[in-house]
Amino acid sequence: MAWTNLASAKTLPGRYHKAYSQLVDGLSKKQIAELKAGFSLYAKGWVTAPSSTKVRDGLGPHFNAVSCVSCHQHNGRGRAPIQGLKPDFSLLMRLSVQGQNKDGSPVGDPVYGTQFHPRATLGVENEGDLELTYTEKNEVLAGGKVVSLQVPSYKFKNLKYGSMSQDIMISPRVAPHLAGVGYLDKVSEEQILEYADELDSNRDGISGKVNYVWNVLAQKKTIGRFGWKANQPTLLQQNAGAFNGDLGITSSLFPNQNCSSLQSDCLSALDGGAPEISDKHLDFVNLMVSSIDRPKVKRLKNYEEGKKVFFQLKCQQCHRPSFQVEGKEVKAYTDLLLHDMGAALADGRADFLANGREWKTPPLWGIGAQKEVNGHTYLLHDGRARNVEEAILWHGGEAEKSKQMYKALSEEERESLLNFVNSL
Ligand code: HEC
Ligand code: HEC
């Protein structure tokens, strides 16, 4: 991982396609030096404490992966698990039981907490394994084309700390790509609220609900914008949450190891300091992540026709074309709001104000580069869709009409629409 000319760095290091690795303009030399330090904390593997690698020790005791890039490869999207194999570690499983904590967050399983950890450091039990199987179901489009969709089903195996709660609720999620997240962090609250219409007062069948989530630094609830359910309010808290939940690294924002009170081996394992990542280092990582520019994607043919179809099908009612950020038009194709997407996509697990059928509209920007960067075209919160067409056919609930209109399109119109989305 070579940094070419540090003073004028334009992309993050890496051998592959750079669509998710461009840096924003205008970074100072000092920022680039800090960002480089941040990149190493993000990209290099964390190790078990105690270790001579002081800055990166404290992994676990329970964890999903040893570094951020294990899941966000090339700053990109996680891969969908493959039928029959254990899910890839870029899919994580959130857990909870009925109810809400005082801050509005989901209540964890008494033994396994709010996230399942298939890995652990030496001397500590991992929590168990996760198995995924798919069955297929068909959708038939106008003209007779049959599209097969894979329906996922999950099973926990080899649970090391006994059984889970009877009423356990699960929410599988794959890692989104990180290009442009710094802009989404800066979208003003007013702009997000402008599209919110929780009670559907304009009767267009699309509501759009803001998730208000606990903001640790502000010590109050603020608008959620990161994660598949808009369950994190800021990029900093999202990153600190990832260190804690996914790698087992504590910070001033999340000072507790992710061991429950019933996991004594986990609780008594050595830590890598309190906290394991300092505020300064967390800021470096945050600077690095927030400095990744918008994805760079090339336009496919019939872009303009496809764009028309996108608007005809009312996709833009949720996939809002743009926000204004610092005088720039940021074309993310999301409203950052929650929508009821129907029973087939529902996880049945609430996350702050998001109910079990609601998901945040994900940004569509970057989809066109995913194949080149990550080697696959899997989409949706759990990676079940194998391409854009399948993703559309999974839409239901508030997006049912859009889906039905898609199914009624001619083959040519469908191709234009797919090309448009694959040009974002
Ligand atoms: C185990 C895989 C995994 C690891 C490791 C991981 N992430 Fe993620 N990341 C995810 C998943 C899954 C989500 C979506 C989370 C959700 O919906 O709650 C996510 C979401 C994010 C987001 C929000 C993106 C968006 O558009 O909403 C950011 C930023 C992020 N991760 C940064 C990091 C950083 C920084 C690290 C390292 C400290 C990291 N991640 C480690 C899987 C991972
Ligand atoms: C009612 C709001 C709504 C409408 C209308 C809508 N979408 Fe979506 N879209 C969503 C949400 C929410 C998700 C995430 C669902 C999930 O992951 O389970 C999503 C996911 C997607 C994805 C996958 C994105 C990713 O990052 O995995 C694509 C592609 C997509 N939509 C395209 C479209 C197109 C094209 C249309 C019009 C035919 C459309 N959507 C209409 C809300 C909407």
Image: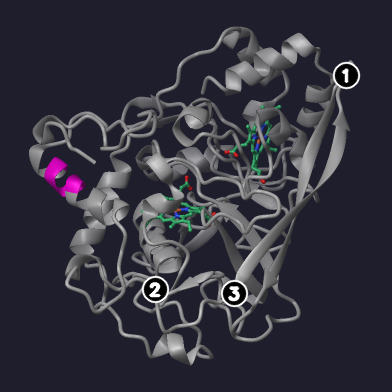
Which of discs 1 and 2 lies nearer the camera? The answer is: 2
Disc 3 or 1, which lies upstream in sequence?
3
Mark found first going from the N terminus, 1 or 2: 2
| Residue 366 appears in the rendering | no
Select label 3 or label 1 by which is in front. Answer: 3
Q: Nearer the viewer, residue 208 or 346?
A: 346
On screen, residue 327 versus residue 322, left or right, reads left
Label placed on residue 60? 2
Does residue 272 lie above or below 371 as drawn? below
Q: Which residue is mark 1?
A: 142
Judged from the image, the secondary structure of the residue bearing numbered disc 1 is loop
x and y, in percent, of residue 169 in the image: 70, 69
Span of residues in magenta: 32-36
Image coordinates for residue 61, horizontal then vertical, percent: 40, 77
Give above or below for 406 relative to 87.
above
The amino acid beneath tag 2 is Gly
Residue 33 on the magenta span: yes
Location of residue 32 (image quadrant)? top left
Identified by mark 3, the residue type is Gly
